[in-house]
């Protein structure tokens, strides 16, 4: 089968690989119908993710059709249409019992990382009963690919950890795909104000379309003042960091109101300055989280009920043969205006 | 009346001052029966608390008897025995309605800070109906002084924010009075293990008596390894920072388990390094809080029911005339082994 | 001044009464600009509310302008535009400290019940700092009258107690004003399905306009089957009782899913059968609540942000002189199709 | 092997049965070392549990040693010492993902009910990875049998659902084994007062030893007054029903304070009167629950930390050969003073 393979920093290729086979009785083999590229995949290609070794098929998102299942899989059978969680969960370890699937002692984010992933014609998915979700045959498959990772990430790490509440104020720093996913899912809780902060006017314009009440281009260094003006000098109840840089996290420290929440989504490569000398007495809560995808069932219900339209995140379409073009488009988003790209084997 | 007055950095004295008078209809004048010294008072004396100006009577803890009340006070009358919260709360502002009394827009921690305090024969307490609490005439007044500030601080900032749960593991970094207050109140929730970390063997021995299951002297730089050994290499569910230094906060970052809580109590004068490069994906919650004293009613019930004995924190007794000695003893705790000192006018 | 007075069962009149005066330093006198009639007022007129004695001016909802304030009121001054909570709260008793204002030991629902109310030109409001809310001069006063009682009632007793969640299913039994208020505010949390059940097709049609996804006329006795069909035979996650009769409460017992919530809003005059023989093992939560109006600040923010339009509940307008007509219209809703009526002095 | 078999109402016997075999790849066969009898077993013997058919081996509690495991079991191997949950959970259905294991769509309470149980030399346990728990070889096996059902039942249905808090007041109606289990585990949260109500002075005396602060023999019909006297006429914050009769549930309705919780544990065979005419405005929460055993890991940690000693519930010991005597002792507790009896194959 065709598969997109990471061959070391800066090296990758569409290659021929053997179709995967059941390795454990809890596995399923899924024929991929739609997959996508995540920002993490770009990090891997640069060599920034040491757990991902050369030779690995990338990709951890997708929808497909069950090809075969292991002997212990009871919830799925060949022919079932499924959504693939980016997180594989045994369901039985102490972390899984707390729905902290990201830290499953034998799973977690392994697809396209420590085992072969979804940017291929077929993928082996461990712990199928816990990690796959039934979808209708006639579902909008492209939209549902957004439930593999990006929407749960925005919702769990940003919105739920940030405790967004009706009428409250929210600032989201970073209007990339994951910041926009937080924007889309924050609206489940009817905040009064969602302020989107970014350097890219195109993305801010999209944020406006997606429901942001206010947008701030932070290029002039005046984002903090702008937020304070919008919030009667109180700051925001929830600040969501969706970039992963010290400067953006530290901006969140400044614009959060007393009693507020800083919910980190960003993947950070460096330490940040935590200004406890001004925050120690401000009753602040700061959270970090790797997405657990525990909210996929909730998200599925909200999509079914038209409470959110994940397809708005999709800007480009490619075949698996064109995956290098897909990476080029996704990796050069400032120019291509790509958010999420769909890849169809 | 006699009162202990801050006269600028390094300068303080027991002085004669006029007895305070009702200034607002919600005020009460309380005749002090017992008060104490807080670590914050030492900071003020050094000049580290800019909000506190020379000429201020210090002290924000105490029990006493109502001398007189303003026209709008309905819950108290002259002769009532009362506990004084270190926080004055209007009860009606947006923060007070959330029980975030520390951020009351016209109150908060003002006693012995921006208005005269309790280290005197009498004190004017604003918002009496919200900020005083009835106590029985025959109550153990000295023990109840611990409910003005230190026990609520340990409980709210440490134990509740740290979400201590039955069977879970807790590490408390800093075995000073506030760390010990966290230790005492953590036991309300029956954690399985409470590890106390400090540099002072005397305080660690006290912690053992107060219910710590394990103590670690961190002088050898091996506290992290010791915690990991005690926790099957997982780290602790709750790490409570009760020192206020970058090194101790950063130790908490290292010894907290995935999914765990870092609850800051310490008063920090400097920024700390937040190692998001290792914490971003570990589902950590970090909290800060200035004590709200919202738990005084709960604490009063637990004291009445003998679930906690606050008097164990009291090591020394002085009269108000001896307050300079009291400060000397409290300020030199390494030598005097002082925890909390009681001062009786 | 003119005031609508209850003179015993079946007897009431618009009378001349002296303008109220400040009785306690925490009081305010408010000149009423808009008020309304509550279902409870109808109960009083029938003689069903023993706490309300003949001679009482009715009404517990309204917006107005401060005429004067007592000496201890600090948050309001003459000329301020205000919203009046139906609940008066001292702010300092044990219940108020838990935001359970409805059970304030010296307040609660007393307006138009044990003290004179808002269906008059002026009203004396106790505990003004806790029980009044600033509104802008140019606010939609009629819409905001809905925040005095009916919207907080639907939100607190129905939606919050019922723990409505994104994507979940909700059934509301009773499409009268309070059931519709629950319907409007449930949408803050983006449930996937809101099923409205009533006997009146007009009200069900209104419910559809207000956001119900499904409506069921229960006249044929088949509401339960209809709900089960809509919910894959699981029942609903949240069942909200907004009628106050045994039959409707018992319907909620049947249509709630395992693990679900029954949130009672209805005012019940009789006991109901609780079928523990079938519910004991179904992990059900049943709640009751008298509105606390603790959510008025949240509601105000959601109205400002256009997350809910309270004015849709208003069907009729009257002057205070026409209040008997207003009662007639409101009391005969099946014919007049009245939801909430606005009365302007 | 020997096994205790239900043969229809009033008929049961110790019989010879074939040793069970692995039926699904997720099964384990466990050699029983210790088991016990539950009140539910008595109900089965009377014919009151229609799901349990004649021919069934009874018992749903126990500890043992793994004899063999199915191909999909990864967490256990032959020779492992294990605790058996009374609930079998697939871990993957919608209920299991919410930790509502009792409602697992293919599991739940099936052991000794719809499949053969633990009162035998061996038992087949479905979903072994989710439903068994490792215990040390040298553990107090008899004490840990209490974690199969009775302690989680008291904790989950009574204490957690009842939201017991430090300093608060609790009444437990029914001092049988499950009421006593609630009493033992309530103390994890340091309530200020635990009032035990029963008709049997012996059990009340035991309750006193187990930590009840007050006991009331309700035979004189004055339990309500006694509770009101103990609680300043407020009633209790948490009322736990541990009997299963209308009268005891209705007593809970009367003795719960405004804002309080009624947590039902009792197995009810009949409807009860819910007095909504007096409860509708009292902000009450009523919960029901079939034990999920989701707290077994927490309980295991508290036992290890000596926060609770489950062995105090054990009053009698029998061999499997003596199981009829064991049932006689357990079934006649008023005379034998039996709480839990241990049976050793």
Image: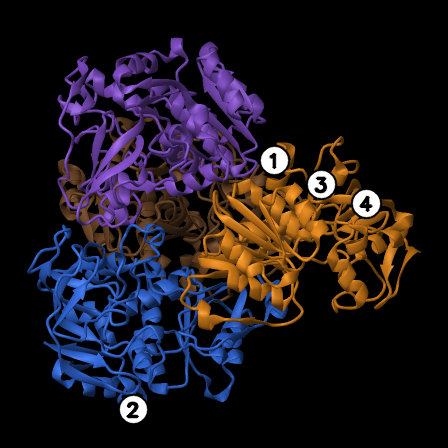
Chain colours: A blue, B orange, C brown, D purple
State the separation of the CA atoms marked 2 and 1. 65 Å
Tag 3–tag 2 contact (CB < 8 Å): no
Residue C153 vertical placement versus D239 (above, below): below
In the image, D61 versus C70, the foreground residue is: D61
Protein chain holding label 2: A
Tell me whether marks 3 and 1 sit on the same chain.
Answer: yes
What residue is disc 2 on?
A: A335
In three-dimensional space, the C-alpha distance between marks 3 and 2, rounded to whole angstroms, equals 67 Å
Residue picked out by circle 1: B307
Which residue corresponds to the image point at 17% horizontal and 59% vertical from the top-left?
Answer: A27
Q: Residues within 10 Å of mark 1 (few under 14, many from 20)?
A: some
D203 over B104 or under it: above or below: above
Q: Is residue A286 left or right of residue A290?
A: right
Residue at image mark 4: B316
Label 3 or label 1, whichever comes before in sequence order: 1
Q: Kindly give the residue lying farthest to the left in the view shown.
A: A79
- Please state the chain letter of the residue tagged with numbered disc 4 in the rendered image: B
For the C terminus of chain D, the image quarter is: top left
Q: Disc 3 versus disc 1: distance between alpha carbons? A: 13 Å
From this view, report whether residue C168 is shown above or below residue A39: above
In screen coordinates, is B121 left or right of C343?
Answer: right
Q: Is residue C303 visible?
A: yes
Dots 2 and 4: beta carbons under 8 Å?
no
The picture places residue B245, in percent across and down from the top left corner, at 65, 66
Q: Residues within 10 Å of mark 2 (few under 14, many from 20)?
A: few
The residue indicated by pointer 3 is: B312
Q: Are marks 1 and 4 in contact (CB under 8 Å)?
A: no
A83 relative to B239 in the view: left or right: left
Picture coordinates of residue A264, whole percent (x, y): 43, 69
**Mark closer to the chain start, 1 or 4:** 1
Q: CA distance from mark 1 to mark 4?
A: 23 Å
Task: Identify the element where label 4 is drawn.
Answer: strand
């Amino acid at each position: 089968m065709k598969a997109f393979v990471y061959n070391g920093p800066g090296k990758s290729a569409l290659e021929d690989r053997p179709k995967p086979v059941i390795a454990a009785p809890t596995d399923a083999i899924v024929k991929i119908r739609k997959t996508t590229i995540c920002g993490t995949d770009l990090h891997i290609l640069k060599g920034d993710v040491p757990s991902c070794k050369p030779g690995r098929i990338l990709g951890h998102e997708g929808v497909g059709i069950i090809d075969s299942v292991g002997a212990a899989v009871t919830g799925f059978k060949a022919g079932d249409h499924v959504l693939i969680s980016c997180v594989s969960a045994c369901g039985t370890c102490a972390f899984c019992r707390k729905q902290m699937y990201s830290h499953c002692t034998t799973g977690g984010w392994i697809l396209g990382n420590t085992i072969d992933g979804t940017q291929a014609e077929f993928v082996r998915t461990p712990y199928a009963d816990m990690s796959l979700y039934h979808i209708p045959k006639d579902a909008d498959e492209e939209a549902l690919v957004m439930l593999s990772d990006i929407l749960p990430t925005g919702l769990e790490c940003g919105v739920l950890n940030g405790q967004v509440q009706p009428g409250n104020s929210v600032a989201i720093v970073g209007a990339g795909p994951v910041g926009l996913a937080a924007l889309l899912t924050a609206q489940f809780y009817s905040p009064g104000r969602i302020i989107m902060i970014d350097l890219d006017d195109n993305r801010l314009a999209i944020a406006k379309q997606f429901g942001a009440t206010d947008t701030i281009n932070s290029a002039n260094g005046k984002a903090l003042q702008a937020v304070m003006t919008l919030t009667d000098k109180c700051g925001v109840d929830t600040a969501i960091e969706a970039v992963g840089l010290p400067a953006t996290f530290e901006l969140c420290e400044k614009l959060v109101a007393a009693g507020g929440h800083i919910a980190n989504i960003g993947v950070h490569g460096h330490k940040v300055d935590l200004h406890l000398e001004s925050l120690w007495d401000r009753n602040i809560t700061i959270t970090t989280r790797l997405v657990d995808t525990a909210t996929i069932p909730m998200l599925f219900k909200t999509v079914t009920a038209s409470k959110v339209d994940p397809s708005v995140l999709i800007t480009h379409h490619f075949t698996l043969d064109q995956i290098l073009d897909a990476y080029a488009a996704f990796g050069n988003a400032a120019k291509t205006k790509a958010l999420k790209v769909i890849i169809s084997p």
